[in-house]
Amino acid sequence: MSSTDFFRKEVNELKSKDLDWKIRVLQSRSVPHSVIDGKEMLILCSNNYLNLSSHPKLVQAAVNAVKSFGAGSGSVRAIAGTMELHVKLEEKISEFKETQDSLYYQTGFSVNAGLIPVLVGKEDLIISDELNHGSIIDGVRLSKAEKKIFPHKNYEELKKILEESEKKFNKILVISDGVFSMDGDIAGLDKISELCRKHNALSYVDDAHGDGVLGKGKGIVHHFNLKNKVDIEMGTFSKAFGVVGGYVCGSTDLKEFALNKSRTWLLSGSAPPSTVAACISSLEVVQSEPEHVKNLWDNTAYWKRKLIEAGFDIGLSETPITPVMLGESSTARKFSDSLMKKGIFALPIVFPMVGEGKARIRSMMNSGLTKEDLDFALEKFEETGKELKLI
């Protein structure tokens, strides 16, 4: 038996349970109407909430940056890979988020995986929401701190843990997603922040799905009017801002700590000029063109209302992430397959990504969708729901 045979064995086991990822190939720009595997489809599963990935200003900024600065930096940020564009982006993030300072990483995942483990040590405690993103889970696992999990959005239980733990640990770090990516519900960051300040704990929010969406685009901290009341705010450019890259923002002390301690930042090649320039442009567009956020929320309200009227269960959603709850994994797969035949790309989310019996189609709203697009999609959702005897 070869030492690499386990590759095939593990994958075959996943395939036998229909749990393997079947990668679809995008053959055009990421816009509402795109070509996927050779067929034009209406995309309802992209995180490109504000439809900025092909915005002319972002595209031109990327092109101009390549012409001026080349294709890459040739180094990690800490040595020779910090270009003036990186500095400008961090200044722009701080201005946009209204914080003292910020640090740009290659991805959002690398922020959580690289920063969380160095914030706490053996004498410390991490308290995490049970439905936090996998990147948070990995960051928590990499730390040497003790770990405690509180039930999803159960802040009475969080309060109890803090009261029991406050005098037992050197530092306590409380971590939560801002918007939870599977259900589209919003964390009670106001409650988390208040509890952290009362019990001398650090507060850390992952605002990946709140960036560009909540708080008129500025995120969950602004949504709850918590300026200067959240210690560590992490986010990403790969969703509403339409580009790629992560960041952490807060105090200048936090930035200097992160760039000296976080190995995912220290030891990864810096983001190329085109990406950094497009990120700068994305923030400028959100500031100067508020219609994108408005359109997103108008579409979200219409989509949710019509789905409910059709008889679908959209769970706990409060954001453009709108699950259509279907129950069994096999049902969600059949629903998605039927939609694809009708020209709609909306993937199923099944066990183990969600609990057993909680499979769904996770539909994602986009500011570039027209009312005609939404009505077409609603018609096909309703058709499919009736075909499968779900509504």
Image: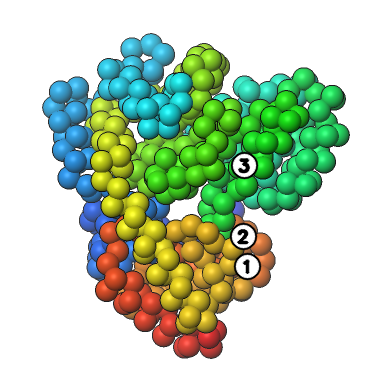
Q: Determine contact: label 2, label 1, CB under 8 Å.
A: yes
Residue type highlighted by circle 1: Lys
Residue type highlighted by circle 3: Asp
The spot of residue 111 in percent (x, y) is 51, 31
Mark 1 surroundings within 10 Å by alpha-carbon count, few (fewer than 14), some (14 through 19), many (20 or more): some
- Quarter residue 382 falls in: bottom left
Above or below residue 130? Residue 97 is above
| Residue 322 seen in render | yes
Whichever of labels 3 and 1 marks the residue nearer the N terminus, that label is 3
Closer to viewer: mark 3 or mark 1: 3
- Quarter residue 270 falls in: top left
Q: Secondary structure at mark 1?
A: loop
In the rendered image, which residue does mark 1 sit on? 358
Q: Secondary structure at mark 2?
A: loop
Mark 2 surroundings within 10 Å by alpha-carbon count, few (fewer than 14), some (14 through 19), many (20 or more): some
The spot of residue 202 in percent (x, y) is 66, 28
Above or below residue 319? Residue 80 is above
Whichever of labels 2 and 3 marks the residue nearer the N terminus, that label is 3
Residue in the foreground of this view, choosing between 75 and 255: 255
